[in-house]
């Protein structure tokens, strides 16, 4: 198992709310190339890897991606916390707020909820690694 330290490796301290930025960042949380998709991609693909070291590496990367998910979630929350509904509407965050209030929900900036269709798991190590490279390159 893992030892979990209850603090972010890179603390998020956003002091000024910005709902427009939150809408841009939400895709990195739950969009097709976001951190949730990345973590599930690596943690699912590891089973078909023929080499124990590569399996372990994909497990470690998947767990690291979950840490990124925590950081991005903290950013979205801090960018919207304490805002009134009219400020959220001005910033384009009103539709999200209607469905999720100020909870952090995995979706794309276009409002599409996270789906497992975002991740590719084919059981072929070469295909899997190409999928990982393409997804990580798209999120840069």
Image (cartoon, rainbow, N blue to C red):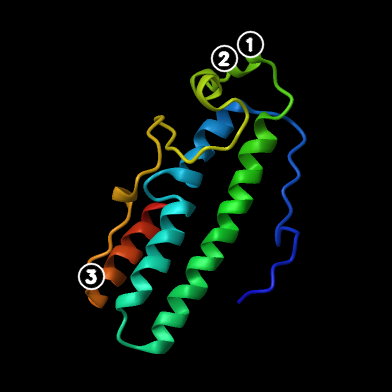
At 72% from the left edge and 48% from the top edge, which residue is drawn? 12
Q: Compared to 96, does 78 lie above or below?
A: below
Who is closer to the viewer here, 108 or 100?
100
Q: Helix or strand or loop: what does disc 3 sit on?
A: helix
- Quadrant of the rendered structure where residue 73 is? top right
Q: Disc 3 designates what residue?
A: 127
Who is closer to the viewer here, 91 or 77?
77
How much space separates mark 3 and mark 2, taking CA atoms? 43 Å
Marks 1,2: beta carbons within 8 A: yes
Residue 140 visible in the snapshot? no
Q: Disc 1 designates what residue?
A: 86
Q: Residues within 10 Å of mark 2 (few under 14, many from 20)?
A: some
Mark 3 vs mark 2: which is more N-terminal?
A: 2
- Asked if residue 32 lies left or right of residue 96, the reply is left
Q: Disc 2 designates what residue?
A: 89
On residue 49, the disc is: none
């Amino acid at each position: 198992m893992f030892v979990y330290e209850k603090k972010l490796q890179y603390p998020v301290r956003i002091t000024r709310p910005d709902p427009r930025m939150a809408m841009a960042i939400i895709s990195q949380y739950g969009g097709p190339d976001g951190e949730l998709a990345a973590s599930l991609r690596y943690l699912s693909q590891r089973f078909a890897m023929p080499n124990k070291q590569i399996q372990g590496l994909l497990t470690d990367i998947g767990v690291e991606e979950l840490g990124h998910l925590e950081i991005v979630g903290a950013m979205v929350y801090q960018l919207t916390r304490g805002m009134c509904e009219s400020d959220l509407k001005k910033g384009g965050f009103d539709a999200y707020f209607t469905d999720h209030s100020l909870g952090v929900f995995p979706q794309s900036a276009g409002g599409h909820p996270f789906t497992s269709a975002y991740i590719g798991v084919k059981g072929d190590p070469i295909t899997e690694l190409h999928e990982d490279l393409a997804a990580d390159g798209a999120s840069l």
